[in-house]
């Protein structure tokens, strides 16, 4: 025999299990949080410990506009999630595109900030402890934004070509979870780098 | 067989395997492109066994060099590469693949599923891990680099800063260490995500979390632990690469960086990592001991709680590897306490296993021989761990051969012994054939003797002041006789492993046919064919207790009456 | 007749017995040169020694109990051949009382062990430094030890001299440990536990040796290719011996005109870039201070006796004794070697 038929007997209750995509994404988020935690710890540990070179107080400007853009993108993606749940595919596409736009604005803002830091203040990753920890932490976050945007863009392309439908809303939510995570990390990074560390 | 009710009519290939047209190339191809959890589990196992032999060869070279004082068998440069590669290989290319070998093969079968939650991620994770391994070993050939510097990594498997800075480790050896492990680490992360998602999302009907077999539980907790264990190492290694390639200063003591912060980050990974490595041994013990004692595991809820407890507490003990770096007395005292506390749930597990055997009808077939030896050895290892947790005593024993003896008592005495137990136990399921019992007993006794000759003796070398990482030692230290004994034991273990390898291959071709359930066991993997068909179960199982097959075999006294 | 598996176990027992016999000298007072942690000669080491025996007693008791139970279970509950193999034993799923018992008892053991350990931690680490203490700064290098005595104004290398201490007249030595490059660790088992030397992270260790003699140890944290040959030698001198040693070390280097040629070789062949000889132009700091090289018993951080032949060969090619050492072979001619060796031989 290749299988012993096992008779379910004590319950005809519905058997509900969590969606694997959601569980998987939560696990990824936990792992990524651990990576970010280590970089944040290094950043905090080295506050004020640079022996020379520009200090945060001298060169950092609080990126209010950038932050508003990124955090708003969490709102727009949430609106997109709601839209696709209610089968409003055009609305979904619009909010999705808005999310991507806001993400791109954030990245552009970061690029401008870094350009200034490197060419105006001479702060690079090898300048001093501040430079090393700043570019590493903010850069790690920016990398996650880039990866997130790549995935969002892929979904946008599929949306524009008509391949995304109401039955994909679960997957959209899982992807949005990643985007919310990236935004949450920015809240921490922003607080540590631009508020606590300055 | 063909007369079962099948879920999808007509779309499954029921042709018995031998009748299919396939060449060895087709067969190889099917393995390379597979996303099937059983094949991937076996591939992880083959990778682990391969690297076990490689790292075993490395340590035999070490033991030849150390058998007598002032030996010239290996130069210091080669010796330092040998022990660095031995440690790195065993932890990342043997230990972690073993986690996923057993988890991948068994978790879907034990929970009544048809595959892992993410089969393609599963394949990707395996190949990433293997790539990491190949990259690490490529260092022997390709590490020479532009200036003829460097070779295999030689900075110990801890790679302490600032020894790993470009100034003290020029060339590419350290880069191979960091990059290979970052790559393998992503494979590990993928594997861990997969195991957790599988166990949460694919359990068959009726299998609540508290009805999962303990092996599955332990693999889930292990994977959860891995999520927050491997990632700090990845972070620290990224920082190291930034230091070495982009001029960063994370660990640059001349620029205000800290050597200590590497230690903290490394051990925040390194300590939970050893629990990651030992959980499969716990998992296998929790399956083998009940079946061969003919009793249900004693204290299932306590075992689950203890496992979760160990995972959590293990996150808070890391600085017991740093008692000698000059932490404050309060800091030292804290880590003494947390380390001693992790011994409590660990002890509870040992007691529960012994209690399982109590009142049983114990059959000492090869898997049970290994699992019983595991119990005694793991007990001793835990106690030497308590000795090491006593910080002032640790100030003597840290960095000495006592520590090597302690952790090998776990890595070999617990993990390798139970890996052998698991292989002998599930080989029939995976191949349809039993392993040879006589060869198995020879393997066990030779390995047992060799293990004790080496590692019991090694504790005393620590007492006599012999430190780690030394390629030779003076003749007047009085360490020669013990070193010679340690080396001889190593050779005996080597012979034992050869017996095992022979048994493995012989049994593949000539082993006695096994049938579905050769051990008269109780979990779902024994309900399907040996080897299982690609789809695992003809019909989706449904369960009512922790031992669904016990319920079927003992309808007058099923488990669900007592749980 | 014993069951088969117990008979095989006889071989194992024989092996263990021989191992125990051979290693028994580890516990007893071994030959002076075996740096055993069980023959302490200084308070920190003996505090650890006494604590370790307490811990051994407890862990030993635990081991005997649990291993005894395991052995009992293996023998008593083994499946017998004549048994009705089809019947299963009574299935016991657990017992809350038993689980509680074997949780509470270990917790109590942990409490006892922890409090005992904490007491010793504070006794050693937070011991107040008495006035009469000697201060020595230890600097770890790849692959040698530098010793600076700030109050006495002397600099030595590789062989540490400290005064004898006694309960009646305590004169401990307080070491301040630094590193010039990577992590090292100072471990002389008979005098104290080890402590690491970490760059930019000074550490402290104190010893109060109560028996004169030479105590051996070595670097205990991997520091590079010659980590194995960074040996430690601690000379515990009587107060008179110590005073004489200090007095000699404080003198500038002997200036013997007979070896002027050798001195010239030393100062022109780049030796002085790394080494110091007090009172001369040689003020290099990368390598050991050689002012009183002949006052040492060993060369190259304890690995070879300080003889003329060894010294000459060391200078000719350090890789002979310490392959990978950071001292390069200076490619001296034979006559230059003879001359510089003769010069160094005068530096008493």
Image: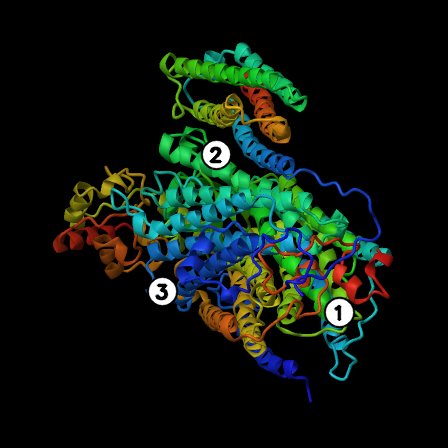
* Residue B503 disc label: none
Q: Is residue B359 left or right of residue C142?
A: right
Q: Disc 1 is attached to a residue of which chain?
A: B
Q: Quadrant of the N terminus of chain B?
A: bottom right
Residue displayed at 61% across by 79% down:
C9
Q: Position of residue B360 (x, y in %)?
A: 78, 71
Q: Secondary structure at mark 3?
A: loop
Residues at marks 2 and 1, common chain? Answer: yes
Disc 2 versus disc 1: nearer the observer: 1
Q: Secondary structure at mark 2?
A: loop
Dot 1 corresponds to which residue?
A: B294
Q: Disc 3 is attached to a residue of which chain?
A: B
Q: Disc 2 is attached to a residue of which chain?
A: B
Mark 3 neighbour density, 10 Å: few (under 14) some (14–19) many (20 or more): few
Q: How far separated are the C-alphas under marks 3 and 1?
A: 54 Å
Q: Position of residue B314 (x, y in %)?
A: 64, 46
Dot 3 corresponds to which residue?
A: B70
């Amino acid at each position: 025999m290749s299988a012993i038929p096992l008779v379910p007997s004590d319950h005809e209750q519905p058997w509900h299990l969590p969606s694997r995509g959601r569980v998987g994404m939560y696990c990824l988020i936990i792992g990524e949080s651990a990576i970010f935690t280590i970089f944040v710890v290094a950043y905090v540990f080295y506050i004020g410990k640079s022996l020379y070179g520009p200090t945060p107080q001298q060169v950092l400007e609080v990126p209010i506009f950038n932050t508003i853009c990124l955090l708003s993108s969490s709102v727009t993606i949430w609106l997109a999630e709601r839209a696709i749940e209610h089968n409003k595919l055009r609305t979904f596409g619009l909010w999705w595109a808005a999310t991507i736009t806001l993400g791109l604005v954030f990245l552009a803002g970061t690029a401008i900030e870094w350009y200034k830091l490197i060419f105006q203040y001479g702060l690079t990753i090898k300048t001093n402890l501040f430079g090393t920890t700043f570019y590493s932490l903010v850069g790690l976050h920016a990398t996650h934004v880039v990866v997130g945007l790549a995935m969002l863009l892929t979904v946008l392309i599929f949306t524009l070509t008509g391949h995304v439908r109401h039955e994909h809303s679960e997957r959209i939510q899982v992807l949005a979870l990643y985007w919310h995570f990236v935004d949450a990390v920015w809240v921490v990074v922003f607080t540590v780098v631009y508020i606590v560390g300055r | 067989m063909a007369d079962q009710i099948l879920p999808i009519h007509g779309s499954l290939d029921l042709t018995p395997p031998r009748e299919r047209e396939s060449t060895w190339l087709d067969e190889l191809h099917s393995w390379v492109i597979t996303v099937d959890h059983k094949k991937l589990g076996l591939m992880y196992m083959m990778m682990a066994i391969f690297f076990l032999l490689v790292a075993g060869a490395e340590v035999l070279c070490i033991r030849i060099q150390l058998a007598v004082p002032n030996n010239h068998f290996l130069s210091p440069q080669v010796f330092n590469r040998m022990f660095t590669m031995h440690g790195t290989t065993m932890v990342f290319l043997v230990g972690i693949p073993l986690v996923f070998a057993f988890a991948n093969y068994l978790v879907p079968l034990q929970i009544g599923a048809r595959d892992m939650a993410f089969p393609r991620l599963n394949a990707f994770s395996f190949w990433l891990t293997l790539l990491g391994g190949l990259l690490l070993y490529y260092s022997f050939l390709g590490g020479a680099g532009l200036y003829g510097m460097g070779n295999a990594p030689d900075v110990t498997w801890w790679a302490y800063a600032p020894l790993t800075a470009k100034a003290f480790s020029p060339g590419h050896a350290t880069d191979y260490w960091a990059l290979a492990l970052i790559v393998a680490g992503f494979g590990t992360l993928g594997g861990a995500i997969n195991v957790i998602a599988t166990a949460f999302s694919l359990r068959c009907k009726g299998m609540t979390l508290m009805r999962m077999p303990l092996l599955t539980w332990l693999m889930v907790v292990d994977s959860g632990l891995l999520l927050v264990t491997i990632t700090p190492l990845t972070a620290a290694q990224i920082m190291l690469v930034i230091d070495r390639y982009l001029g960063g200063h994370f660990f640059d003591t001349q620029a205000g960086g800290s050597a200590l912060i590497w230690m903290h980050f490394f051990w925040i990974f390194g300590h939970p990592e050893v629990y990651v490595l030992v959980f499969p041994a716990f998992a296998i013990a929790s399956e083998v001991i009940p079946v061969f004692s003919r009793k249900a595991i004693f204290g299932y809820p306590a075992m689950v709680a203890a496992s979760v407890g160990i995972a959590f507490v293990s996150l808070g003990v890391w600085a017991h590897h740093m008692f000698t770096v000059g932490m404050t007395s309060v800091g030292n005292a804290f880590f003494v306490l947390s380390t001693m506390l992790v011994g409590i749930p660990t002890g509870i597990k040992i007691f529960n296993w012994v209690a399982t055997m109590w009142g049983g009808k114990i059959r000492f077939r090869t898997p049970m021989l290994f699992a019983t030896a595991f119990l005694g050895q793991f007990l001793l290892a835990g106690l030497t761990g308590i000795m090491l947790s006593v910080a002032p005593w640790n100030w003597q024993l840290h960095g000495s051969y006592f520590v090597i003896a302690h952790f090998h008592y776990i890595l070999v005495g617990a993990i390798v012994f139970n890996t052998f137990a698991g292989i002998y136990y599930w080989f029939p399921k995976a191949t349809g054939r039993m392993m040879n019992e006589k060869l198995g007993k020879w393997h066990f006794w030779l390995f047992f003797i060799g293990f004790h000759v080496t590692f019991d003796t090694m504790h005393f070398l620590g007492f006599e002041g012999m430190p780690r990482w030394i390629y030779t030692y003076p003749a007047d230290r009085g360490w020669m006789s013990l070193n010679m004994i340690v080396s001889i034991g190593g050779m005996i273990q080597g012979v034992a492993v050869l017996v095992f390898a022979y048994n493995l291959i012989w049994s593949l071709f000539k082993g006695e046919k096994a049938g579905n359930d050769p051990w008269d066991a109780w979990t779902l993997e024994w309900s399907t064919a040996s080897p299982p068909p690609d789809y695992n179960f003809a019909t989706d199982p449904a369960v009512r207790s922790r031992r669904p097959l016990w319920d079927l075999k003992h309808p007058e006294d099923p488990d669900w009456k007592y749980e | 007749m014993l069951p088969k598996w117990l008979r095989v176990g006889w071989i194992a027992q024989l092996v263990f017995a021989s191992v125990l016999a051979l290693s028994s000298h580890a516990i007893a007072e071994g030959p002076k040169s075996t740096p055993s942690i069980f023959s302490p000669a200084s308070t920190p080491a003996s505090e650890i020694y006494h604590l370790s025996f307490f811990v051994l007693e407890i862990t030993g008791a635990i081991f005997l109990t649990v291993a005894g139970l395991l052995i009992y279970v293996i023998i008593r509950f083994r499946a017998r051949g004549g048994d009705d193999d089809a019947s299963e034993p009574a299935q016991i799923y657990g017992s809350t009382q038993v689980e509680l018992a074997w949780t509470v008892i270990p917790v109590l053991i942990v409490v006892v062990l922890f409090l005992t350990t904490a007491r010793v931690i504070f006794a050693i680490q937070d011991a107040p430094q008495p006035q009469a203490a000697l201060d020595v700064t230890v600097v770890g290098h790849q692959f040698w030890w530098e010793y600076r005595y700030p109050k006495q104004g002397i600099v030595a290398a590789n062989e540490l001299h400290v005064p004898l201490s006694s309960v009646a007249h305590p004169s401990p030595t307080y070491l301040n440990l630094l590193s010039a490059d990577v992590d090292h660790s100072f471990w002389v088992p008979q005098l104290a536990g080890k402590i690491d030397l970490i760059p930019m992270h000074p550490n402290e260790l104190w010893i109060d040796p109560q028996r004169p003699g030479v105590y051996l140890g070595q670097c205990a944290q991997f520091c590079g290719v010659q980590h194995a040959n960074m040996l430690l030698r601690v000379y515990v001198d009587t107060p008179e011996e110590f005073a004489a040693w200090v007095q000699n070390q404080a003198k500038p280097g002997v200036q013997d005109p007979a070896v002027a040629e050798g001195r010239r070789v030393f100062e022109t062949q780049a030796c002085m870039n790394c080494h110091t000889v007090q009172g001369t132009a040689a003020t290099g700091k990368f390598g050991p201070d050689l002012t009183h090289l002949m006052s040492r018993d060993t060369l190259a951080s304890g690995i070879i006796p300080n003889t003329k032949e060894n010294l000459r060969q060391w200078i000719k090619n350090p890789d002979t004794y310490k392959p990978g050492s950071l001292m390069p072979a200076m490619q001296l001619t034979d006559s230059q070697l003879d001359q510089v060796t003769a010069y160094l031989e005068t530096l008493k």
